[in-house]
Image (spheres, grey):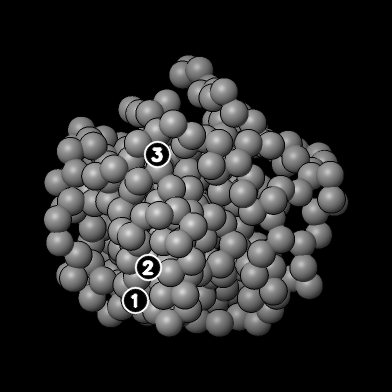
Amino acid sequence: MTALFHSPFDRRSTASEVVEGIDLSGKRVVITGATSGIGVETARALAGAGAEVTLAVRRPDAGEEIAASLRAATGNDAVHVSRLDVADLESVSAFAAAWTGPLHVLINNAGIMMLPELERGIHGHEQQFATNYLGHFALTLALRGALSAADGARVVNVSSSGHLFSPVVFDDLDYRFRPYDALGAYGQSKTAGILMAVEADRRWSEDGIRVNALHPGAIATNLQRHTGGLKTPEPHRKTVEQGAATSVFLAGSPLAEGIGGRYFEDVAEAPTVTARPVGFGVPAVAGYALDAASAVRLWDVATAILH
């Protein structure tokens, strides 16, 4: 069994701290959903370290405002904006087709959470599964050539401890038979993102592409707009700066070189559990989210959906 990966950082570390002293000049980064929350802070830290950062966002006007503020704050003019809606396959295809040259880091950060009613998205699939997983799966596949051209690329999937609420239910992905459960649907979509990291890393690591997933922590952002706000008790919450730390570490730290197919929390690899941990703030990943057979099965299912 491979030992769990640990870093010098912890849950209190900030995004800026994990890249302090690191020069990312020449690295090209794409971040989806970078107009609010940890997406903005992730972009700020990576741009501050010298990376060329593209904010891939649904609303370019809002993205331009964020980009202008990041350029001013970091002194890095290489902060760009491109339109991307991961819930729309045409938008995904257009974004990928317009991309030229290598891509060193792809951060699949955009997401929706706990839609109160059953909605359907890509090809009629449940909207959280479609947006959080299928759209990012399509984007990552479409950018594989650019990632390969980087001669050492990283893909970072922002998942959630919410994955502990549901495995991927292959026999009813879209609540055709089960009563709709907002939290269960969210959990399934976040488990799917972890399984994607497992299988993508297995398939692509020989091409120099390493893929990991992570839980950023409990951070009050727009993500909780359907939940009535963040429910996690105050002592277990993180600031946005702390919440972006694990994404930034996996994206830019030399310490994460050669690491892939794993799930991180609090800037360290989380231990695997076979039952939900009791209480808040317990780093953990469900065994079903790392299951190799399930990862292959989901990859095949998603590929069939997209084709």
Q: Earlier in the sequence, mark 3 or mark 2?
A: 2
Q: Earlier in the sequence, mark 1 or mark 2?
A: 2
Q: Name above or below for residue 223 compared with residue 161.
A: below
Q: Nearer the viewer, residue 198 or 5?
A: 5
Residue 41 visible somewhere in the drawing: yes
Q: Which residue is mark 3?
A: 252
Q: CA distance from mark 1 to mark 2?
A: 6 Å
Residue 295 visible somewhere in the drawing: no
The answer to whether mark 3 and mark 2 are in CB contact below 8 A is no
Q: Name above or below for residue 84 compared with residue 30.
A: below
SS state under label 3: helix
Q: Which residue is mark 1?
A: 83
Q: Name above or below for residue 174 compared with residue 53.
A: below
Q: Earlier in the sequence, mark 1 or mark 3?
A: 1
Q: Residue at x 18, y 70 (%)?
A: 98
Within-10-Å neighbours for mark 3: few <14, some 14–19, many 20+: many
Q: Could you tell me the amino acid type at mark 3?
A: Gly
Q: Nearer the viewer, residue 50 or 29?
A: 50
SS state under label 2: strand
Q: Could you tell me the amino acid type at mark 1?
A: Arg
Q: Residue at x 48, y 66 (%)?
A: 69
Q: Could you tell me the amino acid type at mark 2?
A: Ala
Q: Residue at x 53, y 42 (%)?
A: 16
Residue 56, numbered circle: 2
